Amino acid sequence: MTKFQLSERNSLTILVTLSAVSLVSFGLDIYNHYIYNLGNYLFLSTDLSRGNLYFTLLKDSWSLTHYYTTYVVPILEYRIVFFVLSFLTKFLIYYLVFRIARLLTENTALSLLVAGIFLFTPYHQSHGILLNGMWGSPGIFPAAISAIASLVALFLLLRFRYFLSSLFFCLSIHLHLLYGFTSLLWLSFFLPL
């Protein structure tokens, strides 16, 4: 009986295909793009945000979300850029879940299966209705970037690169406090005491 082996190149091809299937089956996340990208840009560029704490923080020059909204969101108004970056966001999520699974299982085929099952599960039943870009429609918005930063941090933590891991966890928390802090909190349950 021969063992089934996948090369790194074939794995990347499968992950690109999974990202394309996700894009075709779920479509682009236009709703979150309008709310979290273009809506923030509108409030940041007008004076409609007076008295609202969230938009006060969005105007803060120490906030990464301020720079994301000021410099990245105007580029996302071009549909092709939004499409390509949404696809790349979904691909990065698939790739990082695959790499984390491969670190844990040391089996490429099993890691692809784990990444596919984990990311193609019905999201409302198993992950709740608040999406962070990992499940459902591909899109690029601060919560999706926060999810990518959390996955990079977990990958670096599993490779014993604690300082870099902590920087990515900080980035995740800074971009989306709820998702970044929740991923760190869940991870703390599995750390040895």
Image (tube, rainbow, N blue to C red):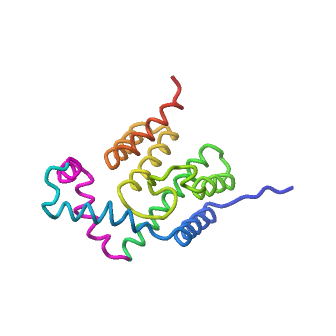
Determine whether, in the image, residue 127 is placed left or right of residue 175: right
The one of 182 and 108 positioned closer to us in this rendering: 182
Q: Position of residue 46 (x, y in %)?
A: 15, 64
Residue plotted at (41% across, 45% down): 179
Q: Quadrant of residue 47?
A: bottom left
Using the image, determine if residue 159 lies above or below residue 61: above
Magenta stretch bounds: 53-79
Report the magenta stretch's main SS.
helix
Where is 147 relative to 78, above or below? Answer: above
The answer to if 75 sits in the magenta stretch is: yes
Q: Give the quarter of the figure containing the N terminus.
A: bottom right
Q: Quadrant of residue 32?
A: bottom left
Outermost top residue: 193
- Asked if residue 161 is positioned above or below residue 23 in the image, the reply reads above
Q: Is residue 32 left or right of residue 101?
A: left
Q: How many marks?
A: 0
Front in this rendered view, residue 14 or 140: 140
Image coordinates of residue 2 in percent, x first then y, are 83, 57
Horizontally, residue 176 falls left or right of residue 153, namely left
Residue for point 21% across, 48% down: 57
The residue shown at (28%, 64%) is 72
Residue 67 x %, y %: 23, 57
User: In the picture shown, does residue 154 fall above or below 88?
Assistant: above
Residue at point 45% right, 41% down? 183
Please check the rendered image and state whether residue 64 is part of the magenta-colored stretch, yes or no.
Answer: yes
